[in-house]
Image (tube, rainbow, N blue to C red):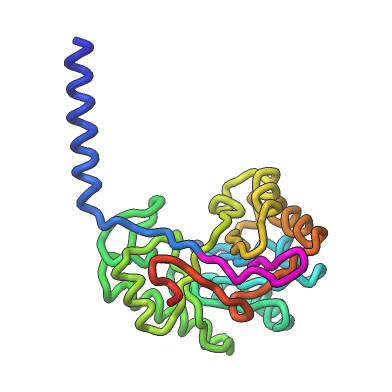
């Protein structure tokens, strides 16, 4: 009986591999910036504003401590967070706003679910997501975005090629600072404080009720105390894999 169970498991596992083989393999690109010539180092802080609200713990800490950041905003978030957008626009030396899509739909051109979110599902839908995100930014009076980061930060290789053709660089990352905003404060602080010269940190600025946000602030302040210089993507020489920047 045990042997039969073993056989059934093996068959089930093979089927799982075959089934998952039907979906396009996705990539999660990395991004690094050019290391500093001297000093404690350079890191780029990127914060996603997917939807929902604004984590004012993070926004206030950035303003008070003069920490520059690249904020990836969606059309949905822009509509609902006018006060936060006004604060960011009042500090153009600190905040660069870039494209996180119109409706926070993963830039994957085949139908599938990524972390429970339905993908764009077709090339046309990927284009619509990218272009509507850029249009939403321009409508608020922002300069045209140069960087794109899709919802979930996973892509099909063909979607990457399409987005590059539209003229956007694709923003991967090298440190997942808050685990999709689901980490505890301590773990988020630890991950961010561990950033090294050339790292690109991703975290979220749209989850004010999550514990992770408190940790994001602690981690950033620890980096600042170490003398780390924060740079924005438009001021950095960013290099990504999977053809995302070259
Ligand atoms: Zn997002």
Whether residue 211 is visible here, answered yes or no, is no
Q: Assess whether residue 201 is covered by the magenta stretch.
A: no
| Quadrant containing the C terminus in the rendered view | bottom left
- Decide: is 108 above or below 166: above
- Decide: is 193 above or below 147: above
- Residue at coordinates 39% horizontally, 66% vertically from top-left? 242
Task: Give the percent coordinates (x, y) of residue 76.
Answer: 50, 71
Position of 166 compared to 239: left or right? left
The one of 171 and 36 positioned closer to us in this rendering: 36
Position of 49 compared to 2: left or right? right
The one of 50 and 245 positioned closer to us in this rendering: 245
- Decide: is 204 above or below 142: above
Whether residue 226 is visible here, answered yes or no, is yes
The one of 240 and 104 positioned closer to us in this rendering: 240
Spot the residue most to the front.
37
Q: Assess whether residue 32 is covered by the magenta stretch.
A: yes
- Residue at coordinates 73% horizontally, 59% vertically from top-left? 220
Task: Give the percent coordinates (x, y) of residue 10.
Answer: 21, 27
| Quadrant containing the N terminus in the rendered view | top left
- Residue at coordinates 57% horizontally, 85% vertically from top-left? 140
- Residue at coordinates 59% horizontally, 75% vertically from top-left? 233
Residue extent of the magenta highlight = 31-44
Task: Give the percent coordinates (x, y) of residue 133.
Answer: 46, 78
Spot the residue most to the top.
1
Tally of numbered tags: 0
The one of 17 and 135 positioned closer to us in this rendering: 17
Q: Quadrant of residue 112?
A: bottom left
Q: Quadrant of residue 208?
A: bottom right
- Decide: is 177 above or below 32: above
């Amino acid at each position: 009986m045990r042997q039969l169970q073993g056989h059934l498991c093996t068959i089930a596992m093979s089927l799982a591999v075959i089934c998952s083989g039907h979906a396009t393999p996705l990539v999660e690109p990395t991004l690094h910036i050019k290391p500093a010539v001297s000093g404690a180092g350079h890191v780029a802080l990127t914060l996603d504003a997917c939807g929902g609200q604004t984590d004012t713990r993070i926004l206030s800490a950035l303003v008070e401590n003069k920490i520059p950041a690249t904020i990836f905003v969606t059309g949905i978030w822009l509509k609902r967070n006018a006060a936060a957008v006004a604060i960011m626009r009042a500090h153009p030396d600190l905040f660069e706003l870039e494209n996180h899509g119109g409706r926070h739909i993963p830039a994957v051109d085949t139908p599938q679910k990524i972390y429970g979110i339905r993908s764009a599902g077709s090339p046309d839908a990927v284009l619509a997501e990218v272009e509507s995100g850029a249009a939403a930014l321009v409508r608020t009076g922002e300069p045209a975005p140069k960087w794109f980061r899709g919802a979930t930060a996973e892509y099909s290789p063909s979607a990457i090629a399409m987005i590059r053709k539209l003229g956007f660089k694709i923003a991967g990352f090298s440190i997942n600072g808050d685990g999709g905003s689901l980490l505890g404060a301590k773990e988020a602080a630890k991950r961010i404080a561990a950033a090294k010269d050339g790292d690109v940190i991703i975290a979220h600025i749209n989850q004010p009720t999550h514990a992770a946000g408190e940790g994001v602030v602690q981690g950033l302040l620890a980096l600042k105390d170490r003398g780390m210089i924060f740079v924005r993507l438009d001021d950095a020489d960013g290099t990504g894999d999977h053809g995302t920047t070259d």
